[in-house]
Image: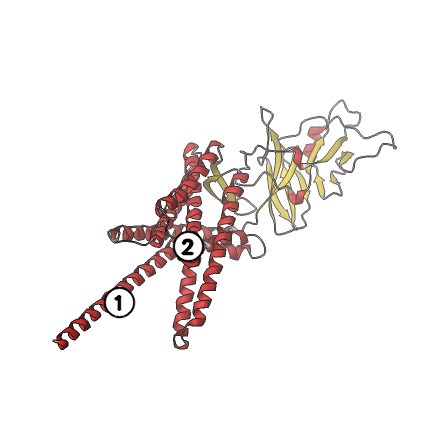
């Protein structure tokens, strides 16, 4: 780009994405009229001047807007602190800047680049394109600082190169992030305690014959138990610096637990379908064994493939525009793998379970219409409690993840954190309700048997 010169012939039109200008210290600001304003510092002008140039007071400023598809980072790389490598600001081009014939770097007076932003709700990060010794390129942030001025992104960089602003999802303020972190940690700790208690209760009742539904609830609780433990471990180890293979292993474990949780919620929906829709002829040979192979086998197979592609490592999230606070954990670092195995898989599970939930609502409405008017209020209360319990075990709270973007993103993020952080407690309450209801029915059944036996003996005595 330094060898490019301004066309001498007027017949040769200048490209709309190419700008050539001679600038001096008296006019160091250049507006491309394409949404970019460049402010060259005096130090940059001095370092870029060449003694061989005829006019030492001015230098050539070359600006080019290149298609962002030219700058393709490797899939395994990611911007430090969690910014994705793809979404350049509003789909715009990459801004390339060259000044004079000398290299300009390590400036004490940085060059300022203003990227006009029509959406003030987005959060971005100033980056430049760096080529390593092997010729592979990646976006990097060192030497550049990001600030916001009247909704525009201002990049202050101590060197010249190819620049862009990478967009991250809407990130709440640091105070909200701290609150969300505490909610997550407390919720995970309580969920671990309550799911462990439920597993112990199940083992104590193992001598009795348990229904398949109870067994499935316990399997879901086991996956939640492992999920919250792996989450806390991932957060803790990711803050210890460069953990290498340990963080990769924890990222794989966290991914496996999350997929297992999604799979067991889908199994909950399938079992509900058998109980409410088919009702009769639902006997399946080695039913629980097959469900266990699916519930734990599908996540295992998935993470083995992801592990071969080295998709795990330290993943960080920015919490504010000044990058003063960050939350990191060991997780999936490849965006494509995350979208397919997490977002896509969760979407399919939720679609299936929402269909099952609609069937349940239809059944409840049909039974509700047949109930006696005297018991309407009491039955309605039980129906709502049952509906909330089913929403929990069918994984409906996970669906809030799709609403964490947009005007209600902060509210949705709080709701998502609370519902899923304390999901272990909700599952425990559901399991306890089922256990108490089963004992109550057994007590009523045994009491009815004693009364029938007593009446039979009385009739026998009277006859004699």
Instruction: Name, please, the residue furthest toward the left.
Output: 464
Please indicate, yes or no, whether residue 256 appears anywhere in the rendered image: yes
Asked if residue 444 lies left or right of residue 271, the reply is left
Q: Nearer the viewer, residue 279 or 209?
A: 279
Which quadrant of the structure image shows residue 41?
Answer: top right
Asked if residue 66 lies left or right of residue 82, the reply is right
The image position of residue 235, as x and y in percent, is 42, 43
Q: Nearer the viewer, residue 196 or 283?
A: 283
Against 143, residue 458 (above or below) is below
Query: Which residue bears the numbered disc 2?
Result: 274
Please indicate, yes or no, whether residue 318 appears anywhere in the rendered image: no
Identify the residue shown where x is 50% and y is 53%: 399
Find the distance from the CA under tag 1 to the CA under tag 2: 27 Å
Q: Nearer the viewer, residue 112 or 393?
A: 393
The image position of residue 159, as x and y in percent, is 64, 33
Q: Secondary structure at mark 2?
A: helix
Against 124, residue 64 (above or below) is above
The image position of residue 280, as x and y in percent, is 39, 57
Q: Quadrant of the N terminus?
A: top right
Instruction: Name, please, the residue furthest toward the front.
Output: 464
| 10 Å crowding of disc 2: few (<14), some (14-19), many (20+) | some
The image position of residue 362, as x and y in percent, is 48, 63
Which quadrant of the structure image shows residue 164?
Answer: top right
Query: Which residue bears the numbered disc 1?
Result: 444
| 10 Å crowding of disc 1: few (<14), some (14-19), many (20+) | few
**Label located before the other in sequence (1 or 2):** 2
Identify the residue shown where x is 40% and y is 70%: 379
């Amino acid at each position: 780009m330094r060898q490019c010169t301004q066309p001498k012939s007027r017949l040769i039109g200048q490209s709309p994405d190419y700008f050539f200008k001679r600038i001096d210290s008296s006019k160091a600001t250049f507006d491309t009229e394409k949404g970019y304003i460049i402010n060259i510092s005096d130090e940059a002008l001095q370092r870029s001047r060449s003694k061989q140039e005829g006019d030492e007071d001015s230098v050539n400023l070359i600006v080019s807007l290149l298609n962002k598809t030219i700058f393709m980072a490797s899939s395994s790389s990611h911007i430090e602190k969690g910014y994705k490598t793809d979404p350049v600001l509003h789909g715009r081009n990459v801004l390339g800047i060259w000044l004079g014939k000398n290299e300009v770097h390590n400036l004490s007076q940085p060059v300022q680049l203003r990227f006009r932003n029509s959406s003030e709700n987005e959060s971005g990060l100033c980056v430049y394109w760096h080529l390593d010794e092997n010729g592979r390129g990646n976006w990097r942030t060192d030497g550049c600082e990001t600030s916001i001025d009247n909704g525009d992104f201002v990049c202050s960089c101590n060197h010249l190169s190819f620049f862009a602003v990478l967009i991250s999802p809407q990130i709440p303020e640091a105070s909200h992030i701290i609150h969300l972190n505490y909610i997550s940690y407390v919720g995970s700790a309580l969920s671990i305690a309550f799911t462990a208690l439920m597993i112990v209760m199940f083992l104590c009742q193992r001598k009795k014959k348990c229904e398949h539904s109870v067994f499935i609830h316990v399997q879901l609780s086991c996956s939640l138990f492992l999920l919250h433990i792996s989450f806390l471990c991932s957060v803790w180890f990711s803050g210890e610096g460069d953990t290498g293979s340990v963080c990769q292993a924890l990222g794989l474990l966290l991914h496996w637990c999350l997929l297992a949780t999604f799979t067991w919620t889908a199994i909950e929906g399938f079992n509900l379908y058998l109980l409410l829709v088919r009702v009769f002829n639902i006997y399946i040979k080695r039913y629980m064994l097959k469900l266990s192979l699916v519930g734990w086998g599908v996540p295992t197979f998935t993470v083995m493939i992801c592990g071969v592609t080295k998709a795990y490592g330290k993943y960080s999230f920015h919490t504010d525009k000044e990058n003063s606070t960050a939350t990191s954990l060991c997780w999936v670092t490849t965006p494509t793998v995350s979208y397919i195995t997490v977002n896509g898989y969760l979407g399919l599970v939720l679609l299936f379970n929402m269909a099952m939930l609609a069937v349940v609502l239809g059944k409840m409405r049909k039974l509700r219409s047949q109930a006696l008017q005297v018991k309407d209020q009491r039955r309605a209360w039980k129906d709502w409690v049952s509906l909330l319990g089913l929403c929990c075990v069918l994984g409906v709270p996970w669906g809030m993840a799709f609403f964490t973007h947009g005007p209600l993103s902060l509210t949705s993020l709080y709701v998502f954190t609370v519902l899923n952080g304390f999901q272990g407690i909700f599952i425990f309450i559901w399991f306890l309700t089922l256990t108490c209801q089963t004992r109550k029915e057994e007590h009523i059944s045994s009491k009815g048997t004693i009364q029938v036996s007593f009446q039979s003996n009385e009739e026998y005595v009277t006859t004699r």
